[in-house]
Each structure stands twice: as structure tokens, then as C-alpha cells.
């Protein structure tokens, strides 16, 4: 604990933190430091994003003995749809966290505005810092995603 760190002893539900606000610092090219005001999302807000934008189902690539389907997670259209859904998670969470309005009448329009305005480095920094704040570690996500194996194209399920 640092000298500046505030400690709250939670003794009741009313003591739980709500609407925690802070700034994410992003160093831009040329050494310019940009401070972006954001707020912490509630657990319900964080999860609702995934419920609002579910990952697509991979297409059936064939059937195993016994009629069980195997899913082709290498299908290019599936992979693009999955990536877009995950991008929407990032944009939607960022839109909920930002302490200012982003132009657009719909979430999709607002996401497009962020996509066209923010540099990749700035967007990735914001997303990474929000993930860290909410307990999601990029290394853990990567490890988990790499642990999923698709079934070979010949349908052999004896991995």
C-alpha cells in the first residue's frame, strides 16, 4: 500500500465501491501523453456485453461415428465472425467505460467511430488496461484459446 492509497473497510453493502473513476494514460507518438477518463464496469455490465454479442457457432465439419457432429473451428467465415464478435466486446466495454460521449446513434456506429478515430496502439492500450482492471489477463486468455483444438479435416477424433 502506498501513502496515497485510500483504504475502505467494507462493513456493509453500502460500503462497496460504485462508479469508480480513473484515467488510463496512453503515450502517443512523439512522447505526447494522453489521459482518457474511464469508469470501472460492474460485473453485470461486463457479462452483459458477452450476452448481447454471443460468439458464433462454428459450422459442422462432419460427423463422428455415432452421429455426433464435429465443428470446423478453422472455417474462415467462422473465424471472421468470431473475431468481429470479440471486437464488439472490446468496443462495447470501452463505450460503457468512457466518461464522454462517442458520436453515433447505435453501438455499431459508435464502435465504427472509435475504430476510425483511434490508432491501433491507443485502442489496444485502452482495452488492455480495462481488461487488467477487471481481472482479465491477456496471457490467460491466450493460453485458454490455444488450449482449444479443432478436429482434423478428416474427422479423426482420436487426438
Image (spheres, grey):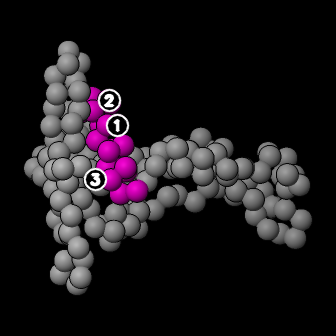
Q: Marks 1 and 2: CB-CB under 8 Å?
A: yes
The image shows residue 110 at horizontal and vertical percentages of 21, 48
Decide which of 132, 52 is in the foreground and name it: 132
For residue 8, side relative to residue 56 (left or right): left
Q: CA distance from mark 1 to mark 2?
A: 5 Å
* Residue 63 can be seen, yes or no: yes
Q: Earlier in the sequence, mark 1 or mark 3?
A: 3
Q: Dot 1: few (<14), some (14–19), or many (≥20) neighbours within 10 Å?
A: some
Residue lying farthest left?
A: 100
Residue at horizontal 87%, vertical 70%?
66
Q: CA distance from mark 1 to mark 3?
A: 28 Å
Decide which of 122, 4 is in the foreground and name it: 4
Residue at horizontal 47%, vertical 45%?
138
Q: CA distance from mark 2 to mark 3?
A: 30 Å
Q: Dot 3: few (<14), some (14–19), or many (≥20) neighbours within 10 Å?
A: few
Residue at horizontal 16%, vertical 22%?
32
Residue at horizontal 79%, vertical 45%?
153
Considering the numbered disc 1 on the image, is that residue within a helix, a strand or a loop? helix
The residue at which mark 2 appears reads as 121
Q: Earlier in the sequence, mark 2 or mark 3?
A: 3
Considering the numbered disc 2 on the image, is that residue within a helix, a strand or a loop? helix
* Residue 109 can be seen, yes or no: no
The image shows residue 144 at horizontal and vertical percentages of 60, 52
Q: Which residues are magenta?
A: 118-135
Instruction: Give yes or no for residue 84 being in the magenta stretch.
Output: no
State the predominant SS element of the stretch in magenta: helix
Badge number at residue 1: 3
In the rendered image, which quarter is residue 16 located in?
Answer: bottom left
Badge number at residue 124: 1
For residue 22, side relative to residue 85 (left or right): left
Residue lying farthest front?
A: 3
For residue 60, side relative to residue 123 (left or right): right
Amino acid at each position: 500500500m502506498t501513502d496515497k492509497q485510500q483504504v475502505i473497510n467494507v462493513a456493509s453493502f453500502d460500503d462497496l465501491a460504485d462508479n469508480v473513476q480513473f484515467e488510463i494514460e496512453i503515450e502517443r507518438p512523439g512522447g505526447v501523453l494522453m489521459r482518457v477518463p474511464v469508469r470501472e464496469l460492474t460485473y453485470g455490465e461486463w457479462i452483459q456485453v458477452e450476452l448481447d454479442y454471443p460468439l458464433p457457432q462454428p459450422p459442422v465439419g462432419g460427423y463422428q461415428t455415432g452421429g455426433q457432429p464435429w465443428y470446423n473451428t478453422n472455417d474462415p467465415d467462422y473465424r471472421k465472425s468470431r473475431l468481429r464478435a470479440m471486437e464488439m466486446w472490446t468496443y462495447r466495454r470501452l463505450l460503457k467505460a468512457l466518461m464522454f460521449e462517442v458520436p453515433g446513434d447505435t453501438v455499431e456506429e459508435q464502435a465504427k467511430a472509435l475504430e476510425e478515430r483511434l490508432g491501433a496502439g491507443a485502442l489496444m492500450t485502452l482495452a488492455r488496461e480495462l481488461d487488467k482492471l477487471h481481472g482479465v489477463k491477456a496471457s490467460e486468455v491466450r493460453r485458454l484459446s490455444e488450449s482449444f483444438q479443432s478436429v482434423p479435416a478428416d474427422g479423426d477424433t482420436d487426438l
